[in-house]
Amino acid sequence: MTARRGIALAWGALVLAVTAATSPAVGISRDESVYVEAGASYSRFWREALRDPAHVLAAVDRHYALNHEHPGLAKGLFGLTRTALSDATGLLGEVQGSRAGAWLLAAFLALLLALWGFDLAGPPGGAIAPALFFLVPRNFWHAHPAALDLPVTALVLATTYAFWRSTSASRGRLSTAGWAVASGILFGAALATKHNAWFLPPVLLAAWVLGSYRGRQPGHGPASEGAVGTVRGHRFPWALVAMAGIGPLVLVAAWPWLWHHTVPRIQEWLGYHLHHENYPWMYLGKLLRKPPFPVAYPFVVTALTVPLAILVAMGGGVAQALARVVAAWRGRGPEVSVATEWLLLLSALFPIALIAWPTVPRFGGVKHWMPAMPFLALLGARALVTTGRLLWPARATAVTGVLAFLVLAPAAWQVVHVHPFGTAAWNEIAGGAPGAATMGMQRQFWGEAAVAVLPAVNEHAAPGSRVWFQETTALAAHQYQRDGRLRKDLTVASGPEDADISIWQYHQEFRDREFRTWTEFHVTRPVAGAYLDEVPLAQVYARPGAWR
């Protein structure tokens, strides 16, 4: 086994093991609760389709109508792992069984980062790049739930990697045509996971076009000897042709909802995401409500959530890539692949810039520009390796190891410290959770923090109590009950008016729900809560007599 493959497999195995071990503590988010149910429904479709192929279209409409606004590939994987690990064998509960599909894709992402990091910066790059991604607390949190954000990030990275292989001199084992076909298949898989993938072809095309211009950079090798502005290996992007031809076929094949009424349903899918709900600015904190910060929102939130040392490494990687492009244009970097630099830069910056566009809906959290993070990790890893070589060429590996430790150790502490509240993680610039709360930033997202108060509810709630879970969905409450994490005698209430217990989770645009609870219950003091560095994330209120 080569060192490159060994590092990649080791990272994949490590991420799979760590996510599986740490997943039970992570709460069920709003989106995940829907995807778990959808995955189970899709799994039932495939079982019915195998038993009765003659009525497959009727089964499609029955089972894929649930959450049909999002493609079905990742949710189908969640259903498959749930069937294998929960329904058929009982090894895991239904939620953890569904999450196993997400763990596998997280491991795939780590493996890809190690491979590409090795290609860019040798063994140290392959070892560091996955760590720079997964030691960002919010990225680490997203490796757990059966949701769509990390899966599409993995598939965007895989598609871009295959595109890079198909257009560069570094092909590996596959031919140019083989990598192009792989790009088409992976692009289809990304399309069949989430709509983020729509923007891949224009980004890849722009990177290729920009990479075609090299200014005074001399060419390399016999293929371009004596030429200026051409470099061997900058091939025509046949991968884009394959993506246009193969991608839509894979999308339809992997999403049975499109097997009939294909065009109207694709139009409905596109229309839903082009006219999505826009959350109010109060979601984003005091700082971001003032011009020009709303437009800079994703850049500011990234700067406040990525651990500071990792942020510096990533910023250094972006600066290095820009410097390499400029040096190549001026004829001072003959060994630089300008196309590679543009590919990494655009892939790292475009997802963030897209969310910054004034007409694009604003959402909570960092998940909507997460596809940028693997590329920032690659650039950061290469920057650290380059710095180590410059500081002490004779001991470059050792110096790089020390630099990596200095960058990664504080981030690792943050991951451990905030777990399982990854969506509540804020960095040193924000002042951690207390500083971010003072700034008016969101304290948690999607209702998963309620998991921390379930033991208290189980112990103290009066028999048959009605619980208003507020941001945690009724689906999630029932999933907690089926997995044995919530008492089955408790029922889900629709509001404080018909509830005995109210679980309030700090969410800026839903503050009125806490006031409604106070008014209805005639209490303002919580009976239990979940806290991060003394910052309340979830608090439990109870009517008199409902809490024993």
Image: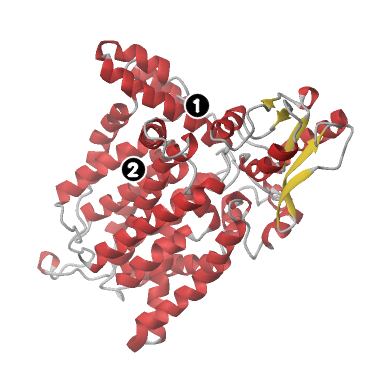
Tell me which label, 1 or 2, sits earlier in the chain.
2
- Residue 75 position by quadrant: top left
At 69% from the left edge and 32% from the top edge, which residue is drawn? 470
Q: Pick the residue in front: 280 or 100.
A: 100
Left or right of 354, for residue 235: left
- In this rendering, the answer to whether 179 lies above or below 32 is below
- Measured in 3D between alpha carbons, the distance from the residue under mark 1 to the one under mark 2, in whole angstroms, is 21 Å
Q: For mark 2, what is the residue? A: 201
Residue 325 shows in this picture: no
Residue 50 shows in this picture: yes
Q: Pick the residue in front: 263 or 141.
A: 141
Q: Secondary structure at mark 1?
A: helix
- Residue 79 position by quadrant: top left
At 68% from the left edge and 25% from the top edge, which residue is drawn? 491
Between marks 1 and 2 in the image, the one whose residue lies nearer the viewer: 1
Quadrant position of the C terminus in the picture: top right
As shown in the figure, which amino acid type bears the numbered disc 1? Tyr
- In this rendering, the answer to whether 230 lies above or below 526 is below
Left or right of 93, for residue 209: left
The outermost residue toward the right is 522
Q: Secondary structure at mark 2?
A: helix
* Image coords of residue 319 (percent x, y): 45, 68
CB-based contact (under 8 Å), mark 1 and mark 2? no
User: Which of the numbered marks, if any, corresponds to residue 272?
Assistant: 1
* Image coords of residue 11 (percent x, y): 36, 60
